Image (cartoon, rainbow, N blue to C red):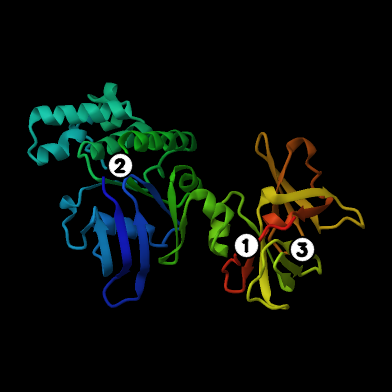
Amino acid sequence: MAGIVLRGIGKRYGQGAAVLRGIDLEIADGEFAVFVGPSGCGKSTVLRMIAGLEAVSEGELLIGGRIANRIPPAERGVAMVFQSYALYPHMTVYENMAFSLRMARRRGAEIDAAVREAADILQIGPLLQRRPGELSGGQRQRVAIGRAIVRRPQVFLFDEPLSNLDAALRVQMRMELARLHRELKTTMVYVTHDQVEAMTLGQTIAVFHDGAIAQTGAPRTLYDAPADRFVAGFLGAPAMNFLDGTLAAAGPEGADVRLADGTVLRAAVPAAGARSGDAVTLGIRAEHLAIGPWTPDAPGLRATLRHVEYLGETAVGYAESSASPAGRLLAVRLSPGDAPAVGAAVVLRAAPQHCHLFGADGRAFARGRTAP
């Protein structure tokens, strides 16, 4: 196994502006790390730099304690699985998996043992004599992973390997990859734009945004304590609700936020350094909103339920409120059997301890003591 360390990594093409800047990250030996973010944020470029397929413009890249900036890809001890399976169509599964070992002039018995061991791990032993055209998408992806396993790398790199699969296969392959990591105990770095894949697979997640890392941490940490508004909105389905307002009052127990319609909601977050009247944003996740029928004296945020999505055991309602900009609906988790009728006037309430608070720069205010 080998850990990976990125120190001040930057990337630019020619004399153009930097596309990556100040990437600092440590991935421990045997860890499953996930790079997640929208298209064009730089996550795949960092993965390709680790693989040696892209040059490092500035900073240091260490693999297994060695500075790898100028080490050729074949000598880095890494194996990469791409979004495209890239299997040789005229070769059998066995021949595809054995190809890299034959190019390395390994002995026949060694090649056979490595291929069959990888096939057993991936449960594709009965497929070894088939050709790629005779396989399903999930089976082809297993073969592509097996081709990497036979090399016994120190680090596995996955570049959106499940993008071409349907929803059911993606769930199955996520479980297979998690099992593979438990069995091999090898360092794995996985790139995806899918926050569900990131949250379910990663021991550590690095959220990329605009050529930099916005936040790194365990899945639960990023979900419960996002560092900024981007991370808060990117992780979670449905996305976090945001309500813009101004700071009405703040103290050690929390802050009061006055919204556009005059409603005041409280967040158990001391807005340290902020002053009354400052622009702030209140963040509330759908599962932390309670919904009830509107009455003239009901405390909370008045809204109108505009749409309900039924998802089996749960449902998501989307409500329109004058406290949020036009066209931005607020998501709230519902019990399907108790969901109000579409068009109903409702009141939304949020417990202060579950509210997040962001400044005008998008950065989250740190939480203090939880309000009772």
Look at label 2 and name its amino acid. Answer: Thr
Distance of mark 1 from mark 2, alpha carbons?
36 Å
Residue 62 position (above or below residue 29): below
- Residue drawn at the location 27% of the way across and 23% of the way down: 125
Q: Is residue 345 left or right of residue 232?
A: right
> Looking at the rendering, which quadrant does residue 249 occupy?
bottom right
- Residue where numbered disc 3 is placed: 265
Q: Are marks 1 and 3 in contact (CB under 8 Å)?
A: no
Q: Residue 339: horizontal and vertical position, in percent? A: 78, 41
Q: Earlier in the sequence, mark 1 or mark 3?
A: 3
On the picture, is 94 further left or further right than 304? Answer: left
Query: Please, which residue is most extreme toward the top here?
Result: 126
| Mark closer to the observer (1, 2) | 1
Q: Which residue is mark 1?
A: 367
Q: Secondary structure at mark 1?
A: loop
In percent of the image, x 57 and y 58: which residue is there? 232
Q: Which of the 4 image quadrants contains residue 63?
A: bottom left
Decide: is 113 above or below 303: above
**Measured Cα–Cα span from mark 1 to mark 3:** 16 Å
Q: Residues within 10 Å of mark 1 (few under 14, many from 20)?
A: many
Q: Residue at x 16, y 40 (%)?
A: 100
Q: How many marks?
A: 3
Q: Secondary structure at mark 3?
A: strand
For marks 2 and 3 on the same chain, the one whose residue lies earlier in the sequence? 2
